[in-house]
Image (cartoon, rainbow, N blue to C red):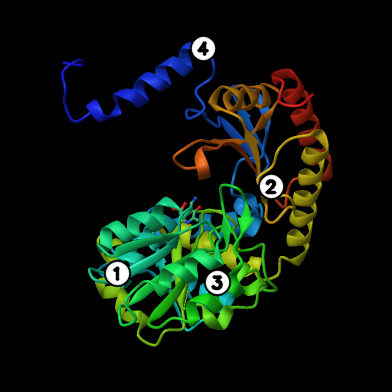
């Protein structure tokens, strides 16, 4: 049975690679269990207190007392789930409230909440760009962006990561009368680098029939005067047609959304399959999200501390001799580049044994075949913790031979 060819045969190479890796005695990097979570920055993994440096809890909202209280109250008042789609029985007062909070946060006329950020991209891209339309996207785009193209059956045109010149060139080759959706991300989550949005927007606007969608999954909360994202910080708010985001990072819960000022936006609620054909978020989740979003409107101090943490860690790791994804810190993500899988796994495991959790990423998720340890900082990491993190990297880097 197991040896015969069937639909699982295509995974044989991956199964063999994984078995070979585990046979070397390393811990399974994709089977970590948080036995207890003490705070946004501290969990117990296999009985050991571990600093979390691999979450997307950028603003540390998961344990905010107001956020938690709002979730508990909604659970009591509205029950555990909606058991239905947004367009049928699944729109409660709380779904309206979180959409109102988003409209206020982003200053837009419309907001549509999905069950995840993945579904927000899937839904927006597939519904906006169909057969015969073009989606022009950065080659390093998130999987949900690619999957949105596949679902909608649009033509995919990739341009070189963050290259304004290549974006312009590829747009120039498309038929002028064809409808195009250009999808950009504010922060690219693998290397933690930021897109040059003003130059990109200018390039797009020099071509006809283009709309622009920016995914601010990793920019919300941290960038811009109102925390809207990189597109706000870089001053291109008026040029962006759609902003997609998630509740699973700075907001601290789960869910996804799109905001827009387009006058026909509301029709999407009836035609967007990943919105219509799935259950809506539980009342407790939308209540925590709404409370968190409203608090993020006044999170200047947290933002400043997060930025300080990012700069300090970037400098600390650079001074130790690690190779990082960006020369300067550009976001709350700092990627440590390693030579191969063996080195990445050894380093990851040593960090874990010393009490530090980071995310490991490998091809195909990573750009240009790189093996990365991705560190993502939190506004709640204390100065002391950032010092400990740098110390643990130094010890692990020496033990594994990544640094001298
Ligand atoms: N877009 C980007 C750029 C992301 O990094 C992610 C998640 N890592 C998503 C969308 C999907 O978000 P969610 O976790 O809410 O599905």
Which image quarter is the N terminus in?
Answer: top left
Between marks 3 and 2 in the image, the one whose residue lies nearer the viewer:
3
Q: Earlier in the sequence, mark 3 or mark 2?
A: 3
Quadrant of res 396: top right
Alpha-carbon neighbours of circle 4 within 10 Å: few (<14), some, or many (≥20)?
few
Between marks 3 and 4 in the image, the one whose residue lies nearer the viewer:
3
Which element type, helix, strand or loop, lies under badge 1? Answer: helix
Which element type, helix, strand or loop, lies under badge 2? Answer: loop
Residue, disc 4: 24
Q: Residue at x 83, y 44 (%)?
A: 383
Residue, disc 2: 377
Alpha-carbon neighbours of circle 1 within 10 Å: few (<14), some, or many (≥20)?
many
**Residue 107 locus on image (x, y percent):** 56, 81
Extreme bottom residue here? 263
- Distance from disc 3 to disc 2, alpha carbons, whole Å, reads 28 Å
Residue, disc 3: 200
- Distance from disc 2 to disc 4, alpha carbons, whole Å, reads 31 Å
For residue 54, above or below residue 353:
below
Residue, disc 1: 127
In-front residue for pair 317/66: 317
Q: Is residue 76 visible?
A: no
Between marks 1 and 2 in the image, the one whose residue lies nearer the viewer:
1
Is ligand 1 less than 8 Å from the beta carbon at label 4?
Answer: no
State the count of labels: 4
Between marks 1 and 3 in the image, the one whose residue lies nearer the viewer:
3
Q: Earlier in the sequence, mark 1 or mark 3?
A: 1
In-front residue for pair 71/190: 190
**Residue 179 locus on image (x, y percent):** 32, 77
For residue 246, above or below residue 228:
above
For residue 100, above or below residue 286:
below
């Amino acid at each position: 049975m197991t040896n015969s060819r069937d639909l699982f045969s295509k995974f044989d190479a991956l199964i063999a690679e994984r078995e070979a890796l585990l046979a070397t005695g390393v811990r399974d990097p994709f089977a970590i269990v948080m036995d207890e979570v003490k705070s946004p920055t501290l969990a117990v993994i296999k009985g050991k207190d571990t600093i979390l440096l691999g979450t997307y809890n950028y603003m540390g909202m998961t344990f905010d007392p107001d956020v938690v209280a709002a979730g508990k109250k909604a659970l009591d008042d509205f029950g555990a789930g909606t058991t239905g789609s947004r367009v049928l029985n699944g729109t409660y007062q709380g779904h309206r409230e979180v959409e109102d909070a988003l409209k206020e946060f982003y200053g837009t006329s419309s907001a549509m909440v999905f069950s995840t950020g993945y579904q927000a991209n899937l839904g927006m891209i597939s519904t906006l760009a169909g057969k015969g339309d073009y989606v022009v996207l950065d080659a390093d785009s998130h999987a949900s962006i690619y999957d949105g193209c596949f679902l909608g059956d649009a033509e995919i045109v990739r341009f070189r990561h963050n290259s304004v010149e290549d974006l312009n060139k590829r747009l120039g080759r498309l038929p002028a009368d064809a409808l195009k959706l250009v999808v950009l991300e504010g922060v690219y989550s693998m290397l933690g680098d930021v897109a040059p949005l003003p130059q990109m927007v200018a390039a797009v606007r020099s071509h006809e029939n283009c709309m622009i969608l920016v995914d601010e999954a990793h920019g919300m909360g941290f960038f811009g005067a109102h925390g809207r994202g990189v597109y706000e910080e870089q001053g291109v708010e008026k040029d962006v047609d759609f902003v997609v985001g998630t509740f699973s990072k700075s907001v601290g819960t789960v869910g996804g959304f799109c905001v827009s000022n387009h006058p026909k936006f509301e029709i999407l609620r009836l035609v967007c399959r990943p919105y219509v054909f799935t259950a809506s978020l539980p009342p407790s989740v939308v209540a925590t999200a709404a409370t968190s979003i409203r608090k993020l409107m006044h999170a200047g101090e947290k933002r400043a501390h997060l930025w300080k943490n990012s700069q300090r860690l970037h400098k600390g790791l650079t001074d130790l001799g690690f190779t990082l994804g960006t020369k300067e810190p550009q976001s709350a993500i700092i990627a440590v580049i390693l030579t191969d899988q063996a080195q990445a796994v050894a380093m990851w495991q040593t960090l874990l044994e010393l009490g530090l959790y980071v995310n490991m990423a490998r091809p195909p998720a990573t750009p240009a075949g790189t093996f990365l340890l991705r560190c993502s900082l939190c506004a709640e990491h204390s100065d002391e913790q950032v010092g400990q993190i740098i110390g643990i990297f130094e010890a692990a880097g020496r033990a594994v031979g990544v640094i001298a």
